[in-house]
Image (spheres, rainbow, N blue to C red):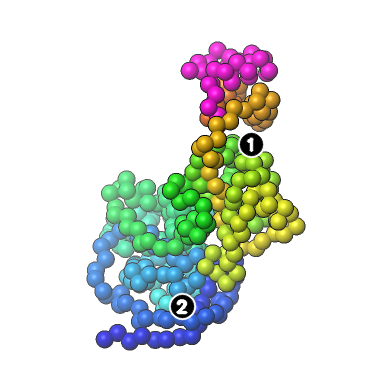
Amino acid sequence: MAVINRRRFALFFCSTSDSLAIDSTHFSPEEPSSKQGTLKSGLYLVGTPIGNLEDITFRALRVLRSADVILAEDTRHSGKLLHHYSIKTPLLSYHKFNEAQREQSILKRLIDGEIVALISDAGTPGISDPGSELAKLCVEANISVIPIPGPCAFVAALSASGLSTIEFTFVGFLPKNAGARRERLMVSANEAATQIFYVPPHKLSQFLEETSSLFGDSRQCVMAREITKMHEEFWRGTLGEAKAAFLDRQPKGEITFLIEGKATSEVETPSEAQLENELADLISNGHTLSTAVKLVAEGTSMKRKTIYSLALRKFGKRQDAGDDVG
């Protein structure tokens, strides 16, 4: 009969801190033995806590104990998690700066029949974290890729957001380049699905300026911060209210930002001035006339030929004027 140890504390594992904080009541059943069942060789993508150490599954613990090696973004950071659960499996660093160099040696270990577990600093590997390329290589090499489900920040934020969960688009981190970032936001602003972004705290003001400009101040949004951690916060309101609320306040920690989709009932015909401004913005960022027309047309119900005619009239017949606009 399994023995249940009762300990009156819960541990929080924070990527931004070297300390573990104490809170609340925690029931810790005896962890299952690593001998419980035999794991087949393959790459195991193991979801790990995004904050609270209680958010790990028995299956994840068994895989981490049974693996021949654990690939981790930051071995020092992940070492705290493994130490807490008395897991002695060797760690090997695997992050965006060395993944290309590690891939072949990892593939060889897998081909030789080893069990390789991959974890990120927090959450699900491959979701805005290293792992997707290695998984792709394994699939191409006919090596088993086994997901071990666990926490994921954007899924947790969406579930508690109060926004529509029927359809959503996970955008993740936006491009650093201003032009590319605006392009991506223009697409998101015209989608009916809930839009989900990861936003670095020091970029929040910039993000709110850009989104309120393109989505409109009245669009509902949710800022989910430090999910599952001691200072978890859900802020809800409009983009205009968010811009005002965070004008002089820079929240700390990991931010997942959600914006409601564009109402499908809204059938708006943009004015010629609006179209001209969008075209001018894209052209000034280096896009050809036809590419600018294509991007603007994707966000409106107007015919592409109509927008192209406007572009030619306003900006002159350029080198791509003979392109087929369909």
Q: Is residue 49 visible?
A: yes
Task: From the top left corner, tell me how far across and down residue 24 is, in percent.
Answer: 52, 80
Which circle's residue, 2 or 1, is located before the other in the chain?
2
The quadrant in which the N terminus is found is bottom left
Residue at (25, 62) in percent of width and height? 40
Residue 252 in the magenta stretch? The answer is no
* Residue type at numbered disc 2: His
Residue at (51, 77) in percent of width and height? 11
Most distant residue in the left direction: 37
Report the span colored magenta: 300-326
Residue 306 in the magenta stretch? The answer is yes
Could you tell me which secondary element the residue under label 2 belongs to? helix
Q: Is residue 176 visible?
A: no
- Which of 81/226 is in front? 226
Q: Is residue 156 left or right of residue 245?
A: left
* Residue type at numbered disc 1: Gly
Comparing labels 2 and 1, the label whose residue is closer to the camera: 1
Task: From the top left corner, tell me how far across and down residue 88 is, in percent.
Answer: 40, 75
Q: Is residue 211 left or right of residue 141?
A: right
Q: CA distance from mark 2 to mark 1?
A: 45 Å
Task: From the top left corner, tell me how far across and down residue 25 is, in percent.
Answer: 48, 82
Q: Is residue 79 above or below residue 24?
A: above
Residue marked by disc 1: 179
Q: Is residue 59 left or right of residue 306?
A: left
What numbered label is drawn on residue 205? none
Residue marked by disc 2: 84
Q: Is residue 117 left or right of residue 215?
A: left
Residue at (66, 15) in percent of width and height? 313
